[in-house]
Image (spheres, rainbow, N blue to C red):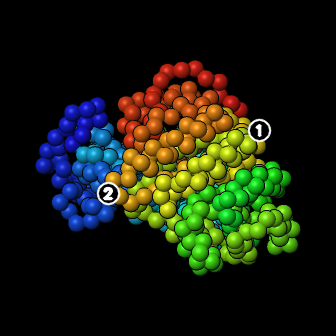
């Protein structure tokens, strides 16, 4: 097996057998049925082959696996739903802790809390919480894993009102590199709790998440307004105008892409470039209709399909465009404004998208996310107003170079207008921007890493290196 510090490590047959029988979950090796399914992840660019996959359904198997990897000094990876663009859920020749089958959720409707197992998807969580008209902010694709999303920060339609996913995290249980199970919250293991709220999987394996919930829907006003791409400049200026004025209940993201064959779009538009304004308003119907009016009653859209719909349905609206199995390459920037130069660049590059499925998206964040200080959680980007992500997406390896070159060129063109920061969950495998992801919080993260994982057992991630540094801990009080 791959050694933690290079080279290979041999596991004796008796040690392997002893480990296998100690587990409740299955241990898959390369010759076993189900192995290929268990190692495949969302991004088809990633093709890695762990030596062993432990399918964990409880804390005991996680502890056993962490101790086994530490004892034998072998490479260790941890998988939630396997959506990470950089493929950090998986490793070559190491031990994979696969949590994807461990996905129950317990909702306490009175206390407005949900306890979530680490393999749950966003769809699982919405399904259980919306039964009580409750929700917590997550992302926009229902098959994404709650674990990886939360550990990076997590943002979606509810974030302007209720903050990031980590801002709603009440507590976690984590198995650290020494094999200990620790409970972390604002009052217990505070340093670890601070670090995992944005610091990724660097500090251990989370075996349980506890989230605060809010009353949401179950019906919200949501949908799309779609404009012809030739009007991109005016549409984006209008978009900018509307999102600067909107309340925290409202959220609008912009997508430049070729029109998919959606049933409500006239056939002549299928495959043509368009600007999509995707909107969600969680206020009452009357308030939502009033506030969405300015966005909708402008120009001559090809389609306007904003209307009342269940929040959980809206949370799956983009699933058909984001299915697993395609080749994907992302480039992302944080911005504090969408200035005219950015609009001109979206117009230029959106006019020559490399494939039918490629998207340029700008998520308008802000609101409650920005009312938290950058040091309050490990996620530091509290001044960001727009998160730009270029989703380059194609199917044949022969298009790899062409598609990636287009994405890199656009990324470089936008760079002078960006903050330099980046959302850690959007970093692709060929970028080293961990320092940009953590900015002022990097020193404290390195110190906590030194304390809990000095050997860097948890390194298949956007890796934070252990370092001895001094830092001034911020107060626990929320700013
Ligand atoms: C189609 C699509 C849409 C997306 N939309 C959004 C969005 O709207 N908002 C948003 O914020 N993000 C979004 N993302 C990004 C998403 O947050 C990341 O891809 C995230 O890493 C996915 O989590 P996962 O559990 O599926 O990933 P995995 O690939 O399984 O894991 C990601 C990382 O987390 C680590 N990890 C996973 N589980 C644990 C655990 N229990 N303990 C410790 N470490 C663990 C893994 O080791 C890995 O390093 C989207 C991604 C995709 C592919």
Of the two numbered discs 2 and 1 in the rendering, the one whose residue sits closer to the viewer = 2
| Residue 67 locus on image (x, y percent) | 32, 43
Q: Nearer the viewer, residue 267 or 27?
A: 267
Crowdedness of circle 2 by 10 Å Cα count: few (<14), some, many (20+)? many
Foreground residue among 82 and 150: 82
Q: Residue at 44%, 50% (x, y): give it.
A: 403
Q: Label for residue 39?
A: 2
Label 2 and label 1: CA atoms lie apart by 42 Å
Label 2 residue SS: helix
**Residue at disc 2, CB closer than 8 Å to ligand 1:** no
Closer to the N terminus: mark 2 or mark 1? 2
Name the one closer to the observer, 317 or 8: 317
Percent of width and height locating residue 98: 36, 56
Q: Is residue 380 visible?
A: no
Q: Is residue 422 left or right of residue 324?
A: right
Q: Which residue is mark 1?
A: 479
Residue 397 position within the rendered picture, expressed as x and y whole percent measured from the top left: 34, 54
Measured along the vertical axis of the image, is residue 181 above or below residue 312?
above
């Amino acid at each position: 097996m791959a050694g933690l510090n290079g080279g290979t490590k041999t596991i004796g047959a008796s040690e392997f057998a002893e480990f296998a029988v100690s587990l409740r979950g299955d241990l898959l090796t390369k010759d076993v049925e189900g192995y290929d399914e268990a190692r495949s992840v969302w991004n088809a660019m990633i093709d890695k082959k762990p030596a062993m996959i432990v399918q964990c359904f409880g804390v005991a198997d996680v502890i056993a696996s962490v101790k086994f990897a530490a004892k034998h000094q072998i490479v260790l990876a941890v998988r939630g739903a396997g959506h990470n663009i950089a493929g950090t859920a998986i490793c070559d020749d190491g031990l994979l802790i696969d949590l994807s089958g461990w996905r129950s959720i317990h909702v306490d409707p009175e206390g407005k809390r949900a306890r979530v197992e680490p393999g749950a998807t966003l769809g699982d969580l919405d399904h259980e919480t919306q039964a009580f008209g409750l929700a917590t902010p997550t992302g926009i694709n229902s098959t994404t894993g709650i674990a990886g999303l939360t550990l990076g920060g997590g943002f979606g339609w509810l974030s302007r009102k209720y903050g990031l996913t980590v801002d709603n995290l009440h507590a976690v249980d984590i198995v650290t590199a020494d094999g200990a199970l620790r409970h972390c919250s604002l009052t217990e293991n505070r340093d670890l709790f601070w670090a995992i709220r944005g610091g990724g999987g660097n500090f251990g394996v989370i075996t349980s998440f506890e989230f605060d919930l809010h009353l949401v829907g179950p019906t919200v006003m949501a949908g799309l307004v779609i404009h012809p791409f030739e009007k991109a400049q005016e549409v984006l200026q209008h978009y900018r105008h509307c999102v600067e004025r909107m309340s925290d209940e409202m959220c609008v993201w912009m997508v430049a892409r070729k029109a998919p064959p959606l049933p409500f779009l006239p056939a002549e538009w299928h495959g043509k470039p368009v600007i999509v304004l995707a909107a969600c308003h969680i206020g009452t119907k009357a308030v939502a209709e009033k506030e969405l009016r300015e966005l909708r009653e402008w120009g001559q859209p090809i389609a306007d399909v904003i209307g009342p719909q269940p929040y959980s349905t809206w949370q799956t609206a983009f699933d058909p465009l984001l299915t697993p199995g395609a080749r994907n390459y992302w480039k992302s920037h944080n911005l504090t404004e969408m200035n005219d130069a950015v609009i001109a660049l979206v117009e230029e590059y959106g006019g020559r998208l490399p494939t039918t499925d490629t998207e340029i998206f700008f998520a308008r964040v802000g609101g409650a996310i920005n009312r938290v200080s950058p040091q309050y959680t490990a996620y530091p980007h509290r001044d960001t107003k727009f998160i730009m992500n270029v989703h380059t997406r194609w199917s044949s390896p022969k298009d790899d170079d062409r598609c990636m070159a287009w994405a890199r060129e656009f990324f470089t063109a936008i760079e002078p207008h960006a903050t330099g920061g980046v959302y850690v969950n959007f970093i692709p495998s060929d970028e080293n921007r961990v320092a940009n992801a953590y900015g002022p919080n990097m020193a404290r993260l390195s110190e906590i890493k030194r304390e809990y994982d000095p050997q860097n057992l948890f390194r298949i991630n956007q890796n934070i290196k252990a370092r001895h540094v001094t830092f001034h801990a911020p107060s626990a009080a929320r700013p």
